Image: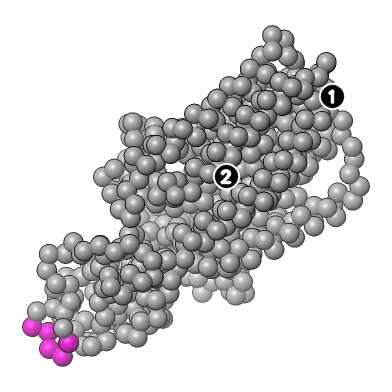
Amino acid sequence: MRPGATEGGLPLRWLDRIAVLCVIFLVVSPLIAIELAEPGLLNLARGVNTFFEQYRRHETVFLAIMAAFAVGTAVAARRTRPAHPATAVSKPIEKSAAYLIAIAVLVFAATAAGTWGVMHAFPFSMDEYVANFQARAFAEGRLAVPLPQEWHQFGRALTPVFVVHDADKHVWLSAYWPIYGLLRAAFVYAGADRFLNPLLAAAAVPLVYAAARRLWPDDRTRAWLAVGFLVLSSQFLFMSMTGYAMPAHLVVNLIWIYAFARRDTAGWLAAPVIGVIALGLHNPFPHAMFVAPFLLQILLERRWRWTLYYAAVYLAGIAVWYQWAQNVTAASADGSLTGLFALPGMLMLAVQELSLTVVLTWQTPLLAVSLLWTAFSWRSLAATERCLAVGIVLPLLVFSLYPSTQGHGWGYRYVYPSLGSMALLGATGVDRLRAVVGANVVRHLVVASGLVTLLVQLPVRAWQIERYVRPFAQTHDYVSRIDADVVIVDPTITWYGIDLIRNDPFLRQRPKILSAFHLRPTDKRVLAERFGDGVHLLTAEEIAPLGLPIYRSRFGAPIWPPPNASGVQP
């Protein structure tokens, strides 16, 4: 059956089912989040963390928007049905390069401004902090950063989450693989590291257009739809305001799609080389999940020489990065990769249902509908389109085996590297939708979706995120400005209190921040002798006015001052 065929009214029933599914998401998902979310509580045993808290606070309104749009699309399809399948007509747009540059500049300006105005120029998650930590070390020519001798005794207490402390060599290093860190280091060296991800976001605009033109050389309309879907993605814009490595993954994956879609020798020779770079950006999983279906496609098409070539290049790259992991970040290996995963229980199935809805609600509404429409149209998809679709779904399947949530993130960050794939599939989905409901209805849907995003989604998301990040940013700023030589943090007095342990890679800042979790009695006595009144214990009462929830300390005995410490005021 042709993509736009309407025999038996089946495609219209697909739209009805999509509408019903979105309404089910609206009803069920908030109930799941409310059941699992425990505001202000980090319950590691149940995996409860900021993912649920953000969902509980933020997502219901966007689930409602998505459901309303899906129902409206189904109703519009019933009222306007073309007499015969419509043919998409691509009208060449003059000065395409000028338009692409203008859109890219606008994306850069919006995301760069949001880095300060929305995200407070603050690495909210420890993933962002460690990426910056690694880049600052690289900028000074260091793979590993030696701790000053006077701080060797306190290495573990000084070490931030996700930074690796080698207690034998007394060095710090990042568990991240190096390519993104090297890229960011160049910007750190130039004093412009906040602009890296906005520049990557801007670069994604012409790349998604170029990939679409390679996939559908005779249909420029799809290319512009792909651009529109990408730049109207709330996840694309707001994650590009952060310090995550994901925008680099998106750009490299788009370059990979472009090379692969060329279907010529140069493109196919380049693609796996690009892929090896992508594997080393910060960890191999984002590109591995994106590229796996394409590699399987080459094998199933019995392109034996290309199969051998891709296998050789990727295996060589994997060997190189494995050696990196063993020789540079071996201290971070707490166990095998298989130890990270487990069979999914009901909690993780519920988490992945929430994750799926987040994938959809962080897009412009028409893209959410179009992606679901494309899923129903699986049999009519071309082989490359199926690969794009599998690359989107695979993270949801893989991380259903990972007994935790994504934690911090805006949208579902594990699919961020595949946002280009989503935009491309959304474009082909709209083309199929046009054949069923008619070009006029589709034009109205495109305009309505864009207006909803610009007038509602983006402003509300910006307000929600800024309000959520602000207390954390203010608390970290307060701690970093305390007039003391050493600040001891009790991580149990506030939510994500362990994240307050953030030290300069070279310990150049004052005060040094230490975790009470890793201070032995002998360590405390040394601090008392060395710094006296220059040691400050952070209290819940200090940070309460900044907006973070506070709790009674879980330590049974007083943390500071140590018993029998002379010269220290209690």
Q: In the image, which disc is placed on residue 87?
A: 1
User: Circle 1 sits in a helix, a strand or a loop, which is it?
Assistant: loop
Q: Give the crowd class for mark 1: few <14, some 14-19, many >=20 residues within 10 Å.
A: few
Q: Residues within 10 Å of mark 2 (few under 14, many from 20)?
A: many
Q: What residue is at 35 percent from the left and 45 percent from the top?
A: 37
Relative side of 397 to 19, left or right: left
Quick check: 440 above or below 488?
above
Q: Amino acid at mark 2?
A: Trp
Residues drawn in magenta: 564-569
Q: Is residue 78 visible?
A: yes
Question: Which image quadrant for residue 517?
Answer: bottom left
Q: Residue at x 83, y 15 (%)?
A: 83
Who is closer to the viewer here, 41 or 297? 41
Front one among 66 and 193: 66
Q: Residue at the far left: name it.
A: 564
The answer to whether residue 439 is above or below residue 525 is above
Mark 2–mark 1 distance (CA, rounded to whole Å): 30 Å
Looking at this view, name the residue that lies furthest to the bottom.
567
Residue 283, position as x, y percentages in the image:
48, 50
Residue 377: within the magenta? no
Using the image as rendered, state which of residue 23 and residue 257 is in the foreground.
23
Quadrant (top left, top right, bottom left, bottom right) of the N terminus: top right
Residue 46: image quadrant is: top left
Q: Determine if residue 420 is in view.
A: no
